[in-house]
Image (spheres, grey):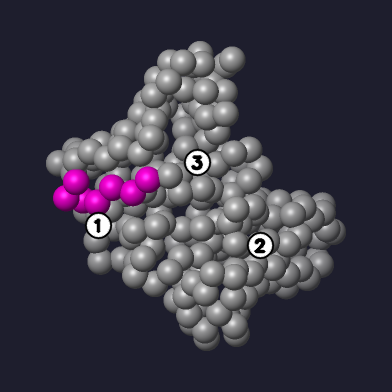
Amino acid sequence: SQQGEEDPQALSIQEGENATMNCSYKTSINNLQWYRQNSGRGLVHLILIRSNEREKHSGRLRVTLDTSKKSSSLLITASRAADTASYFCATDATGTYKYIFGTGTRLKVLA
Amino acid sequence: EADIYQTPRYLVIGTGKKITLECSQTMGHDKMYWYQQDPGMELHLIHYSYGVNSTEKGDLSSESTVSRIRTEHFPLTLESARPSHTSQYLCASSELGLDRVHGYTFGSGTRLTVV
């Protein structure tokens, strides 16, 4: 079964608003990563948060991790039309060396 | 720009044909991966390699095979393509021990259609 699942599946917001996406996973992890995928392209690594970290920032991105709830959230502040993409979380379960990707959230930012 | 290249970008072929999807990276990464992405977006790991002459099957059963004769090259082969193989195939690589810092680098993908 899939390690990570994002919600919502799709999100549509106005430019300038904040976008929040959530990821839930099932087993203990070493770290969690977020990726962006533009339509028809490969994935681009955005940010990594370790299992002993609770929050991390990178530019307009803010990631939180709650290992007790096995969940993470990605916040994009002051969204832009160029942020329109699909966003995936990826986790490596403790004791494994591969990342499993979630189902993705399709974000559409309207100009 | 990512230093990992996939060719072809798009491929439409007939049922029963043998095809090879190419993936090459110039970063010297030890680890390479193939993911299959279905129309619902979910990515499934189908093959991975930790180095030359190392290949493993992923979590999703696949009729494809891979080889890793050179560090930079990780081709995926389908001996007899079927319509059920229609999908997007993504290749990725990472540096051994540093994928937990820098994550994976992905190619742009090959969109395969079998008719």
Q: Is residue B45 left or right of residue B74?
A: left
Q: What segment carries the magenta color?
A: A47-53
Question: Which residue is denoted by mark 3 in the rendering?
Answer: A36
Q: Residue at x 60, y 79 (%)?
A: B67
Q: Is residue B24 left or right of residue A93?
A: right
Q: Are the residues under marks 3 and 2 on the same chain?
A: no
Q: At label 3, which amino acid type do we have?
A: Arg
Give residue A8's position: percent from left, percent from top. 42, 27
SS of the residue under disc 2: strand
User: Would you say the residues marked 1 and 3 are in contact, meaning their CB atoms lie under 8 Å apart?
Assistant: no
Question: Which residue is denoted by mark 1 in the rendering?
Answer: A30
Q: Residues within 10 Å of mark 3 (few under 14, many from 20)?
A: many
- Please check the rendered image and state whether residue A50 is part of the magenta-colored stretch, yes or no: yes
Chain label for disc 2: B
Chain label for disc 3: A
Q: Is residue B21 left or right of residue A80?
A: right
Q: CA distance from mark 1 to mark 3?
A: 21 Å
Q: Nearer the viewer, mark 1 or mark 2?
A: 2
Q: Which mark is residue B5?
A: 2
- Please check the rendered image and state whether residue A57 is part of the magenta-colored stretch, yes or no: no
Q: Residues within 10 Å of mark 1 (few under 14, many from 20)?
A: some
Q: Earlier in the sequence, mark 1 or mark 3?
A: 1
Is there any visible trace of residue A43 in the rendered image? Answer: yes
Q: Residue at x 33, y 49 (%)?
A: A48
Give residue A23's position: percent from left, percent from top. 34, 37
Q: At label 1, which amino acid type do we have?
A: Asn
Q: CA distance from mark 1 to mark 2?
A: 29 Å
Front residue of A36 and B77: A36
Q: Residue at x 78, y 70 (%)?
A: B18
Q: At label 2, which amino acid type do we have?
A: Tyr
Front residue of A109 and B27: B27
